[in-house]
Image (cartoon, rainbow, N blue to C red):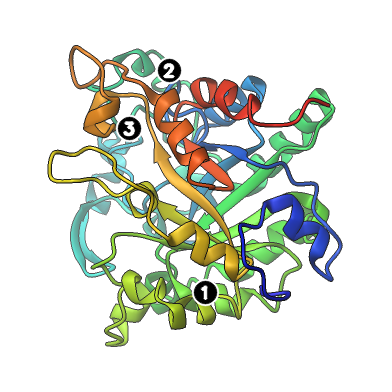
């Protein structure tokens, strides 16, 4: 939220010191493990989160959806056939169905059709087995974790490490779940209260691509709120559902940033919005997005930096197959040079040395 005018970039640390709220224990620039260390373990598993923490990340990022009985669980989508063994359970065969989720027709198995007890009968698996075959060694090793279980693990790992670890919680399909009578905010508030985390020093951040849920939560929590931003031409699902024609590009306009500033503390943007690519797929000069956001005292995290050539801009790719690693460290450095406050990555082990080199010696 705005705390005054500022002509230049504002770091996370400066922002925390400047606000009227009790300051968070922030680190800048931050390294955030996307769905855990998902370049090394199946995403959204306790092992993926724990591996990232033991690598030394500042924060982990996770997505949450909800079960039929109102429990938040860590999955990137509510459709779970790509990340669990649900298709291998004959007793759940009749749960396979087709739905319209955020305007997209999706066929599969959905968390809102399972109780937590039923969901706990499933095991997790690697979502990208062809791209990350080594991760398949950890298939069927774990179940689907609840948000409460993630909070408990992070608290234990923070004690073990002697340094607090942040948790960036993304609320998925909020308007869709609202329409089903399964709002995400109530179980989120309950989990925060149960673990004593609804205070600025908890290192918990609330995020969503949808504006409605963030506006609803902002006055209810004492935590940072981050507006996620996708491709410029796309619309937030909650706005599209009510016929609002605004796109993410509109949210990044001067009026849009002023609007976001009313309820949010930062932005989480796809990396191409900070370092646009040319027709050859190479990165060019940084956009004005970081500068514009910092002038509003909004922090900027970029997503998602991945090591595989398949995800890298042309100028950072290496030789070999699309699953081979290119020059992720160089891409991370380019984003740091553009002034971002945090990097969200599947491969925190490769980004941490680059970010650590930018921090003053303690």
Q: How many marks?
A: 3
The quadrant of the picture occupied by the C terminus is top right
Under circle 1, the secondary element is helix
Q: Which residue is mark 2?
A: 138
Q: Earlier in the sequence, mark 2 or mark 3?
A: 3
Q: Which residue is mark 3?
A: 85
Label 2 or label 3, whichever lies nearer to me, is 2
> Looking at this view, is 13 or 74 the one in front?
13
**Residue linked to disc 1:** 213
What separation in Å lies between label 2 and label 1 (alpha carbons)? 34 Å
Asked if disc 3 and disc 1 are in contact, CB closer than 8 Å, the reply is no
Secondary structure state at the residue bearing disc 3 = loop
Q: Is residue 324 above or below residue 105?
A: above
Residue 6 location, quadrant: bottom right
Task: Identify the residue at horizontal 75%, vertical 30% (top origin).
Answer: 360
Q: Quadrant of the N terminus?
A: bottom right
């Amino acid at each position: 939220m705005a705390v005054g005018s500022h002509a230049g970039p504002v770091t996370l640390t400066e922002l925390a010191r400047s606000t009227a709220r009790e300051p968070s224990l922030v680190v800048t620039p931050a390294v955030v493990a996307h769905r855990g260390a998902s370049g090394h373990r199946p995403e959204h598993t306790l092992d993926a989160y724990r591996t990232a923490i033991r690598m030394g990340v500042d924060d982990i990022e996770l997505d949450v959806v909800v079960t039929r009985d109102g429990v938040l669980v860590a999955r990137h989508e509510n459709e779970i056939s790509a990340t669990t063994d649900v298709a291998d359970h004959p007793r759940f065969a009749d749960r396979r169905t087709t739905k319209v989720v955020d305007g997209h027709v999706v066929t599969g198995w959905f968390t809102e059709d399972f109780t937590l007890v039923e969901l706990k009968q499933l095991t997790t698996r690697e979502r990208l087995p062809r791209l990350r075959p080594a991760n398949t060694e950890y298939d069927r090793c774990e179940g689907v974790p609840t948000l409460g279980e993630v909070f408990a693990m992070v608290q234990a790992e923070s004690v073990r490490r002697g340094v607090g670890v942040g948790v960036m919680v993304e609320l998925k399909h909020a308007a869709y779940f609202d329409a089903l009578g399964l709002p995400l905010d109530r179980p989120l508030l309950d989990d925060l209260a149960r673990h004593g985390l609804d205070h600025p020093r908890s290192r918990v951040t609330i995020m969503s691509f949808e504006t409605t849920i963030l506006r609803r939560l902002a006055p209810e929590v004492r935590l940072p709120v981050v507006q996620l931003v996708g491709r410029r031409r796309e619309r937030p699902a909650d706005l599209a559902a009510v016929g609002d024609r605004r796109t993410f590009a509109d949210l990044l306009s001067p009026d849009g940033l002023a609007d976001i500033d009313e309820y949010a503390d930062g932005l989480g943007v796809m990396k191409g919005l900070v370092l646009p690519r040319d027709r050859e797929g190479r990165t060019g000069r940084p956009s004005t997005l970081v500068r514009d956001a910092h002038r509003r005292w909004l922090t900027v995290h970029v997503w998602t930096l991945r090591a595989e050539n398949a995800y890298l801009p042309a100028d950072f790719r290496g030789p070999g197959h699309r699953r081979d690693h290119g020059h992720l460290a160089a891409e991370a450095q380019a984003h740091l040079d553009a002034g971002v406050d945090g990097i969200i990555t599947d491969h925190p082990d490769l980004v941490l040395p680059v970010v650590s080199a930018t921090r003053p010696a303690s």
